[in-house]
Amino acid sequence: MATVILVRHGRTTANASGVLAGRTAGVRLDDIGRTQAARTGERLGVVPLVAVVSSPLERCRQTAKAILAHQTGSPETPIERAITECDYGEWQGRKLSELAKEELWKIVQSHPSAAAFPGGESMATMQARSVAAIRRLDAAFEAEHGPQAVWVAVSHGDIIKSILADALGMHLDLFQRINVSPASASIVRYSANRPDVVATNTDAGDLSWLRAAPSAGDAPVGGGAGNEAQV
């Protein structure tokens, strides 16, 4: 099975000022975000990647560039619109402190499967399109490069949370229990039996063990022996 590393973009000027950027053009990484992206790129540099797929938004493309700077090979670099930020519609560009007073905010927090942003998309639609894209791309990279293939998808917080919720078998209404920090890496493997969520929301640790082909088959009863990097 191939391995996908889900990377959230680094911190942006909008994140730092408490604004919901959404799909606003020109939102870039701030100084901290650039440092976070470089650190993630360095961390992933020990893993030969077959592709670094990015959301079309600038903050993700900046983060993808930082990851590619530490690769010695020539990964594919497609832009994938289906993993772009949620369309927050009329919420886009507004302060989170103001949005927290809206009735819809409560639904987003407790019942996101029923949340639809005015003038935008529903959270259920957001999850459906992003999960379908990740599974499609994963299957394509495995078919082209084999089960040892490792690739990166650079996307956004709610997108990655919704993909992880699907992989964990969680209803979308529970996805707010998942945290995805700026420039964090989460790791998922899709097999014929089930998705294997290897890690979530990590920002440190050796990833060199990803160079070895993943074991296929049933999940080990008792948890298994782990990988050598954990010794």
Image: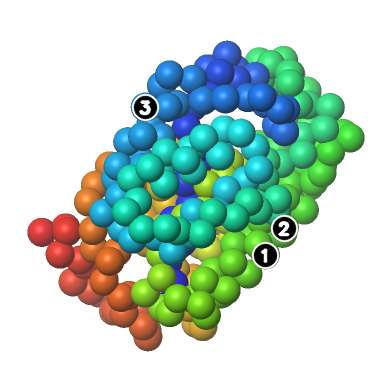
Name which residue lies at 37% across and 27% down: 35
Residue 110 visible here? no
Dot 1 and dot 2 residues touching (CB under 8 Å): yes
Q: Earlier in the sequence, mark 3 or mark 1?
A: 3
Q: Position of residue 109 (x, y in %)?
A: 65, 36
Q: Name the residue nearer the viewer: 192 or 66.
A: 66
Q: Earlier in the sequence, mark 3 or mark 2?
A: 3
Amino acid at dot 1? Ala
Q: Quadrant of residue 197?
A: bottom left
Name which residue lies at 57% across and 33% down: 59
Q: Which mark is residue 35?
A: 3
Q: Residue furthest bottom?
A: 217
Q: Position of residue 198 (x, y in %)?
A: 37, 61
Q: Is residue 101 above or below residue 221?
A: above
Dot 3 and dot 1 residues touching (CB under 8 Å): no
Q: Which mark is residue 129?
A: 2
Find disc 1 in the rendering and name its residue: 132
Residue 120 visible here? yes
Q: Name the residue nearer the viewer: 119 or 223.
A: 119
Query: Few, some or many C-alpha atoms within 10 Å of disc 1 (few <14, some 14-19, many ≥20)?
Result: some
Q: Is residue 97 above or below residue 159?
A: above
Q: Name the residue nearer the viewer: 167 or 183.
A: 183
Q: CA distance from mark 3 to mark 1?
A: 31 Å
Name which residue lies at 53% across and 47% down: 154
Q: Secondary structure at mark 2?
A: helix
Name which residue lies at 42% across and 52% down: 186
